[in-house]
Image (cartoon, rainbow, N blue to C red):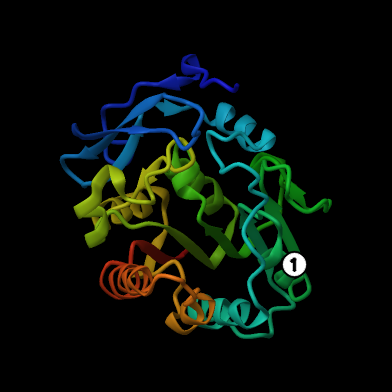
């Protein structure tokens, strides 16, 4: 059985975003169902950011992702499911607000995963680079396990960091690194957990996004502003959204079959009414500009 190497975790009772004091919210178990290890969920008294304490060192995290450890990913996980082409197009048009004519632009994606979005851009831009330590990333010469391996001298016009910052020891450090790789006017696309969401405030440590040590950070509106300012990015837009942003997509994939009608009614109320309509917007989407 795999064990958490606690000597590779550091105590962190001051906020990783603004260095202010904190309070303990809950004691939470890791996502490894075979482990009894528990860690603290903390909240900053100033910017209201949430994080996991003690915090794993980034080198240790990279190793865990590389081997597919059940401390950072669910058992059998092999990256995000393949989105439909129409969803990719919506992502481009709705989120990044760029034209289809991007043949002269350079693209960088942090957290490539299985490469669905990366492959979409790879066919459209001049240069397409990616970073991901995971074993399931595509075997391409322009995808590296470490951001420091990107060739010197290249600058990017589009940078995507979707569902990544919450997995890192130091999200500000990553934003600083990609800022140094950005051309003037470069657009940065980010998505991560929203701890200001009503469901997060109600459930706290029982919120489904609390997944240590896979998820380490949970962002407030205040902590986002401080993080982007410290890293040199201008926030163009910021809003909360559902993990599945289109209710029609969720309805199409919802299982309405059940032998017990009362259980079906309960699932409809829980998953469609509560989770999607009332409490569903537990993710942030942020666009930055260099």
User: Looking at the image, is 229 positioned above or below residue 247?
Assistant: above
Furthest residue toward front: 259
Furthest residue toward top: 7
Query: In this rendering, does residue 239 appear at all?
Result: no
Q: Quadrant of residue 36?
A: top left
Residue located 53% across and 59% down the image: 162
Q: Position of residue 59 (x, y in %)?
A: 58, 28
Q: Position of residue 121 (x, y in %)?
A: 71, 71
User: Looking at the image, is 218 positioned above or below residue 33?
Assistant: below
Q: Residues within 10 Å of mark 1 (few under 14, many from 20)?
A: few
Q: Position of residue 268 (x, y in %)?
A: 36, 74
Looking at the rendered image, the quarter that the N terminus falls into is top right
Query: In this rendering, does residue 52 appear at all?
Result: yes
Give the residue at mark 1: 119
> What secondary structure is marked by label 1?
helix
User: Looking at the image, is 54 positioned above or below residue 44?
Assistant: above
Q: Quadrant of residue 92?
A: bottom right
Q: Position of residue 136 (x, y in %)?
A: 73, 48
Q: Is residue 52 left or right of residue 19?
A: right
* Observer-nearest of 200 and 121: 200
Residue located 73% across and 50% down the image: 137
Residue located 33% across and 39% down the image: 51
Q: Quadrant of residue 191?
A: bottom left
């Amino acid at each position: 059985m795999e064990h958490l190497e606690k000597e590779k975790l550091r105590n962190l009772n001051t906020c990783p975003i603004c260095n202010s004091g904190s309070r303990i919210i809950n004691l939470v178990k890791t996502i490894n169902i075979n482990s009894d290890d528990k860690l603290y969920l903390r909240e900053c008294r100033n910017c209201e950011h949430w994080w996991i304490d003690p915090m794993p060192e980034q080198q240790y995290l990279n190793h865990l992702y590389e081997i597919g450890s059940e401390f950072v990913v669910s058992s059998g996980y092999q990256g995000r499911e393949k989105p439909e082409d129409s969803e990719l197009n919506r992502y481009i048009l709705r989120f990044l607000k760029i034209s289809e004519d991007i043949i002269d632009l350079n693209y960088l994606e942090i957290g490539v995963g299985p490469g669905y979005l990366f492959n979409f851009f790879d066919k459209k831009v001049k240069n397409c680079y990616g970073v991901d330590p995971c074993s399931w990333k595509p075997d391409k010469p322009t995808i590296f396990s470490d951001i420091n391996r990107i060739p010197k001298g290249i600058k990017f016009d589009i940078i995507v960091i979707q569902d990544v910052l919450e997995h890192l020891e130091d999200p500000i450090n990553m934003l600083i690194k990609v800022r140094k790789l950005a051309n003037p006017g470069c657009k940065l696309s980010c998505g991560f957990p929203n701890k200001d969401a009503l469901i997060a405030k109600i459930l706290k440590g029982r919120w489904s996004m609390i997944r240590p040590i896979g998820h380490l950070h949970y962002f407030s509106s205040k902590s986002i502003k401080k993080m982007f300012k410290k890293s040199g990015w201008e926030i163009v837009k910021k809003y909360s959204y559902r993990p599945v942003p289109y209710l029609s997509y969720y309805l199409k994939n919802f299982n309405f079959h059940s032998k017990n009608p009362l259980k079906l009614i309960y699932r409809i109320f829980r998953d469609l009414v509560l989770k999607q309509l009332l409490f569903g917007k537990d993710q942030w989407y942020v666009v930055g500009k260099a």
